[in-house]
Image: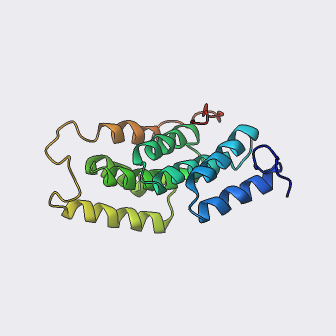
Amino acid sequence: EKLNEATNIPEGKDELWAEAERQLQKKNYKLSRQLWRTFISRYPGDPKLPAANFQVGLTFFSERDYKSALGQFYRIIQDFSEDPIVSDALYYSGLGFAKLGQCKNATAYFEALLRPKSGASPQYQKAAKDQIDILKKDTGDLCFDREDVNAGAAAKRGVQETQREPAKATVPATKPRK
């Protein structure tokens, strides 16, 4: 495994992917995110690009930075609408909104997984149903948006992305954050 001496970032594509996964498993989220972003910038046409973008979102989610994670998952839904990873992005978007107390948004993302054309696996569909049931039973401990008539706007925008014609494959314009 060749490392760039100055950055300690693996030079090879497979080594870079493996090291990003290793760091994620070790809960070194910041380093893992840096490695995933390096993969994204080095290999913009790679078939693993949607998964690498999802992993960036997952590092934010794991750090409880739900807003950054939601931004990353939203880009996946927009930019890779035909990729199976969209189910992951929808589910984790639902979880992220629930963690932020925005249950109307969360429910809309979970409901998107239940649509016949969603392509979501039976496991994701069951998990989404279970999450919806939990949110429906909430008495205000989880959800802070029950009385807000404007709540759910973000989900309406994001979920609509899954209903439109798929966009041509594009390279996301992501820049590493400092």
Query: Which of these two is toward me, 150 or 115?
Result: 150
State left or right for residue 76 relative to residue 70: right
Q: Quadrant of the N terminus?
A: bottom right
Residue 161 appears in the figure: yes
Q: Quadrant of the C terminus?
A: top right
| Quadrant hosting residue 174 | top right
Picture layout, residue 28 above or below residue 53: below
Q: Position of residue 104 (x, y in %)?
A: 26, 48
Query: Residue at coordinates 28% horizontally, 41% vertically from top-left?
Result: 152
Query: Which of these two is toward me, 17 or 131?
Result: 17
Looking at the image, what colour scheme do you see? rainbow
Query: Residue at coordinates 58% horizontally, 58% vertically from top-left?
Result: 28
State left or right for residue 17 relative to residue 105: right
Picture layout, residue 150 above or below residue 126: above
Query: Residue at coordinates 17% horizontally, 48% vertically from top-left?
Result: 146
Extreme top residue here? 173
Extreme front residue here? 6
State left or right for residue 26 relative to residue 148: right
Count of numbered tags:
0
| Quadrant hosting residue 7 | top right
Q: Position of residue 56 (x, y in %)?
A: 57, 48
Residue 117 appears in the figure: no
Query: Residue at coordinates 51% horizontally, 64% vertically from top-left?
Result: 121
